[in-house]
Structures are given as C-alpha cells and as structure tokens.
Image (cartoon, rainbow, N blue to C red):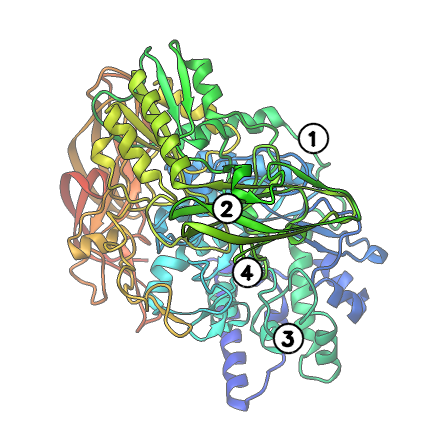
Amino acid sequence: MSETVSRRSTLRLITSAVAVAAAATGGLAPLTSAVAAGRPGTGAGRRVEGLLTRLTLDEKISLLHGGTDPASLGQAGYLPGVSRLGIPPLRLADGPAGVRVTRHATALPAPVLLASAFDPELARRYGRVIGREGRALGQDVLLSPMVNVIRTPYAGRNFETFSEDPLLASDVVAAEIGGIQDEGLIATVKHFALNNQEQDRNSIDVRAGEQTMHEIELRGFEAAVTAGTGAVMGAYNKVNGTFACENRTLLTDVLRDRWGFEGWVMTDWFAAHSTVAAITAGLDMEMPDGTYFGTALKSAVRNGSVGEEYVDRAVRRILSVMDRFGLLDGSAPPRPDRDAAAGAAVALEVAKAGATLLRNAHGALPLDGGGVAVVGPTGSLPFVSGGGSAHVVPDHAESPLDAIRARARGTVTHALGEDLFGKAIPGSALTPAFESEGLRVAAGQTWQYDGTLTVAEDDEWTFVLHFSSAPTARPTVLLDGVELFPLAAGYGEYFSGGLIATAPDGLGVRRRTLQLGAGAHTLRISASGGDAGLLFRLRRITGATRAQDVTEAVRAARAARHVVLFAYEDATEGLDRTTLALPGHQEQLIRAVAAANPRTTVVLNTSSSTSMPWLADTGAVLQMYYPGQEGAAATAAVLFGDSDPGGRLTQSFPVDDDHHPVAGDPRRYPGVDGTEEYSEGIHVGYRWYDAQGERPLFPFGHGLSYTSFAYSDPRARWTREGLEVTFTVRNTGRRTGVDVPQVYVGRSPDLRVDQAVRVLGGYRRLVLPAGERRRVTVRVAPRTLSSWDARRNRWTLGTGRRTVWIGASSGDLRLRTSARVEAAHH
C-alpha cells in the first residue's frame, strides 16, 4: 500500500471521528489541521499557508463569493482577488460547447454530439480548444463540463451532457477535463448531483438509493475527480432531503473523504440556501454574489456559529487550485492568442465524427448528382447551439443550404416548409390600419394602438413579435385583454432558446399560439422608445399560411430527385420539453413531403431523443443535434458521402411519450409535491428497456455506416486488469467506413444486489478500409464489473461466470461468449 493511500485512509478516519464527535455533542466540532487542509495528505503548500496567515477575515471572505467585474467580458462570474497580496481575480465563463462571453469564440458541437463519436481522444482535443480559447479570452475558470446522466428524454439540457450510460460519460468527461486543463484553464464539473431535469430544478427533492447514486449518477463525477478537475459545481436541487450545496453526504463524505477531491466546490448561480450549514457541509464558494458567504458569513464567524477554520479551509482549497495552475506565483504561461482556424477544424471534425445515421432506405444516402430540394427553416438558417449557458458567439456559421449548394452538382432549391418568424398581418385585418411590419418608436417617445383585429374564420394563430430592445423593454401586446408576451419569471427571459428567439436580422422574437374565433378581437399595443429607440414587428402564422408553406415544399419535393428536410427542436437551459414529438406542425410537413418524394432525408437538429411516427415514410434520418459553427459543412459532407457518418446514439430513443423509463409515473418525473423518486434504480436508459423487454425506436449505441461490418471469433479472459475481450471486425462493404463495436457484460451470479441485464463494458472506434479485417481488444475494468453494495458501503466485484456480448448497439448483439471473473488477490 502506498504512502499516499495510507495517508488518505488516515484522513478519512480522522474525518469520521470528527463527524461522530459533532453528532454526539450536537454541535460543530472544530476542524483538525488535516481535515482543514484542502489537499489531503500533502498539505496546501507553503505559499498558500503563508497567504492564509496574512489575509484578514474580510479578505478571506471576499475570496468565497462572487462580485462585480470592473472589466467584464460578459462572462458568468467574477471573484475579486486580493491585490495587496498578489492574489489575482478569477473570471468564470460558461462553456459546455465553447466559451460564452460577448466576444467571438469557436462554437463547438453540443457535448451530446461529441459523446456520439465514442472517442475520448477527440474529447480531449475538444477540451483543448475550449481551454486555449478560455485563456485567450481572459478567463480563468470554465463552468463545464456537465456530466449529469440523461435520465429523462424531456430534460432541457440533455444536449449539454453526454449519455445515459455512466461508463461512456465517465470516459468523455475525464478526457475533456484533461484537454481543458492541459491548456491552463480550470475545469468545473457540474452539476453535483442528480440534477437531471430543468422543471422545478431549484426546489425538487430527488430521492435515490446509494446503489443508484454510485452506479449511475456519481460515476461521472468520480471520473472527473480522478482526472484532476479543479472545481465542482453544486446543483440547485435537493438530494435525499437536503439541498445539494449544503449536503454533507455529497460534499464531504463522498467528494472529499471517499474520492479525495482536493479542489473547491462552488454553487450553481444563486443555488446557496444557508451560511452555517453550507460552509460546514463542504461548500467553498457562493456564486454569483455574497448573499450567504458575504456579510452573513462574517457575522457567523464573529458570533461563533462558524469557526474561522472553516473559512480558512475554503480559502485554502481555492488558493491551492490557483497555485496549482500557476496563478499565485506568476508561473502560469502567457495568455495565448485565439487560434480560430484550429478551433474550426476541431469543430468540423467533431460534427462529422458524431453525425449519427439512424435510417437509410430507398438509396436515400449518400446523395448522388441529381437535384436537391432543401426544405425547412433550419435549412437556410444555421442552427449552431442550444440556448442558455451553451450559447456561443461564433466566428461564423454557414447555412446548410449554402453548404449543400457549394457541394451539389445539380440544382438546389429551397422551400420554407414551416415558418418560424411569421408573415405580415394584412392591413385589411386591422382597424385602424398600422404598419405592423416595421414600426419605429423614437427615443424618449411612446406609441399606443387601440383597435381591432378581424379574423375571417376560426383558426390557430401564432402571433410573432420582433423587437429591437432588451426583452424587458419590449412592447406590450394585449389581445382581448390578455397579454400575449408576458415577461418570463426569473431567468426565463435569458433562457429563451438558441435559435427561435432571434430573427435572421437580429431582432428578438417571442411567440404566442392560441385558437381564435372568427370575428373582431380587441388589440392594444403599448411601446416605448426608451433611450435608444425601438423597432418592432407584429406578425402571424395561421392555418392558411401554413398550408401555403407546405404546398410550396411539396411542389419543390416533387421536382427534385432528393429532398433534405431539416427539422428542429430548440432546447434551452431552464425549460424542459413537454413531448418527444417535433414542435409545431413539422410532423405533418414531413409526412406531406415524404409522400411526394420517398427519397426524403430528415436531418434532425434536436436536443435529445425524438419520436418519429413518420419514420417509415422517409428515406433516411440523420441525427446532427446542435452541430456548432461548422455544422453545415459537416452535414453536407455526410449527406454527400464525403464523410462516413461516425456517430452512435449515446441515449435510447423511445417510440413515443408512453414508452420510456419515466413514462406514466409522475413520481419518477417530474415529481409529486416537490419530491421525485428514482424508483427505476440502476435501470436507466437501455438497462430499463432490457429489464422490461421493451423495444425502443432506436437503441443505445445505434448508428449506421455507408458500408457494412461483420464480427467474428470472440474470446474473453480474466486478467489482473479486468476482463479482456478480443474479436475480429471486418469491413464487408465497398468503401472505407467507421465502426464502433461495443462490448456488453451480463450479471454476476454471485452478487446479491440488483443488477442490470447487461451493461456497457467497453467499445472501440475503428476506421476500416473496404475488405480489411482487424483483431480488436476491449478491456472491461473491474469497476464496470462491480456493483455498489449499500450494506457494506463499498464496491463489490461481480465474480463468477459472466456472459459477454459483442454488438453494433445494445439492441444488435451479434456475438456471445463468457468468462469467469475471479476475486482479486492482493
């Protein structure tokens, strides 16, 4: 046993003793010097200890909460330093898919698209782009990556994370953190823990058992800690009755004592709920302000409810990470310049590597030299990223239509198909008439309208407001006395979407859909020019305008050899989806166009899984998620066969809203009376489908190539390093292609805990020329072969004969063998 392990074991014993003493006395035991040190077994270093002795209490507390940046670049957070002692400030930027500041940055594909490549080395290079750009743009801490599992298909941030499978998520997050921190930017893994939905995220109490937590949700965080992440962000929600940011079980027992984390823990923005409970539980930093860790913390120290050693512990953890990254002694490398070309190259590579071909029939793909009709609003608009924290200001973003025109040899036409931004309201429908297509209100002026909108027949109307002002200063529009575009509560205006919240000319956009009866409706509008003046438009989408758009799309489809129909779903932080169906009337559009031309390829720019009642009508379906600034070029490359679609699904796609792990049980999602139960236990994603004998629309790991592959000669044997699985892969087609063979392992006969039917044990991403065969070895780690035993509070190796499957997805298992797993002897 190494000296380091021995010291950590000693530390855990000390910590346990402190906790027991505190519980026995009903008070807070003072921290021992070992526990107070943010770096178990090694100490925080002389430089940090020297600073701690010189910092005043006010200065220490100033390092534990966010403040106002005097020179902000629009980043999410700022920690003022202590210039007197040479402690620099920290700037903290969002960045799951690129650095989110007001400057230009490389808009990388969404993390779910990165994970679809099943390629940790690519994830490391993805991280290096963000790391370099973060430092180049004046940032010190990246508020990313997110590693919460994809538990419900409705979660609004599924595109910001990686997978429903904890092994894949662990591999990707560890590699990405390595890349970010290789460039000198401090990574923050988030959101710790069980933050798997946006609905009620600030208050929901998530109840989960130990086995579920350790095997499913916590494994990615543990991998991040092992990879050396500098910071951890606590989640908004409660975990088993206690808010995550003041949860001693999570922040101390698991994160520090079990995993040996040596960095600092910050809140998600405004996720703090207490002073004493939070800092003693293990929280180190409150963001973005000092509501609880400012004056309130100073008062708590002064009146004795918090010992100053807890403040010292938190400061020590923060300064130790800063010291590790060379921020205290000036040894950090100079800030580099952005390398926009290198960033764009990685963005393109990731988008092509993660492109996932779900269906390919009727010879739909790759496209040949015939004419192409591009259909859909997102065919002519670049759909770069989701909304909220993931939004990046890209250097450029080409539209798919332009990329397809540049690549195609035949004629390329475009039809809108479905209107996102509305058409002008006819003047004849307004009494009195006004210029609804572009009304300007001068600075300092106000404009009022009090009139009537006359509707010819009962119909569904979508009112679309375009405005040039800040969202909170947009016009007020009342129809029959009802405000059509009320301001969203809290951060709702900020989390308004990544695509449909902005018109092509840059104006802000809001929508409201309702049924209108034939006849007159009162319309009142109030607009203020404010300090800078206001331009606004009021438009509409009706049954008549939709029918016209669909008719034009069908006409274009009939006239072309191929159709590429771009479908969208605009997800954002702060808002869950309500259905797996495509929004609006896209399903009817797809059916109409595919009926006119069976060689219709649907390209999905969606956040997560999608139901597809129209699937059998189409020729092909290509899942591109949110593909970043190079998404158009990557999509065109895959459509025309210049690149083999290299992606595989990191999540199961359900058939519909009634057949998936959280369907039909509101206690599982979204929760009942403020409490949510993870009663599915360890059976998340494909594990649930296997346990229930339910077939998804598309299984985890699914993805087609433009060639074909055969697997043969499986072997499995137990070694000290785990289970070694070997097999042969052969490209049986006529062109070079990408394959991702996957190894799954069955239950242990010796474990007396709940087990999945099978779990992903490992995978390999291969590029094979036509006719080539390759012997492949996949190693399944002992951790993957183990289960968490809550009675023993530890991982237990699943010994005995284990079945091993090799397949192209969790639903396409082509080979089977077995091996006996033996207990390790040390």
- Residue 92: x and y, percent? 65, 50
State the residue position of label 2.
Answer: 463
Q: Label 4 neighbourhood size at 10 Å, few (<14), some (14-19), many (20+)?
A: few
Q: Spatial distance from mark 4 to mark 2, Cα to Cα?
A: 15 Å
Q: Which residue is tagged 1?
A: 337
Label 3 – label 1 distance at C-alpha: 40 Å
Quadrant position of residue 358: top left
In this rendered view, identify the residue nearer to me: 313 or 467: 467
User: In 3D space, how far apart are the residues under numbered discs 3 and 2 (Cα atoms)?
Assistant: 46 Å
Where is residue 307 drawn, in percent x and y?
A: 68, 79
> Which amino acid, by three-letter code, is at mark 3?
Thr
Instruction: Report, in whole angstroms, how far the alpha carbon at label 1 lies from the one at label 4.
Output: 54 Å
Which numbered disc, 3 or 1, marks the residue that appears first in the sequence? 3
Question: Is 614 situated left or right of 297 in this image?
Answer: left
Amino acid on which disc 1 is placed: Asp
Q: Position of residue 491 (x, y in %)?
A: 58, 57
What residue sits right under mark 4 in the picture?
481
Out of 686 and 491, give the one closest to the viewer. Answer: 491
Helix, strand or loop at label 4? It is: loop
Q: Which mark is residue 275?
A: 3
Hey, which quadrant is residue 216 in on the image?
bottom left
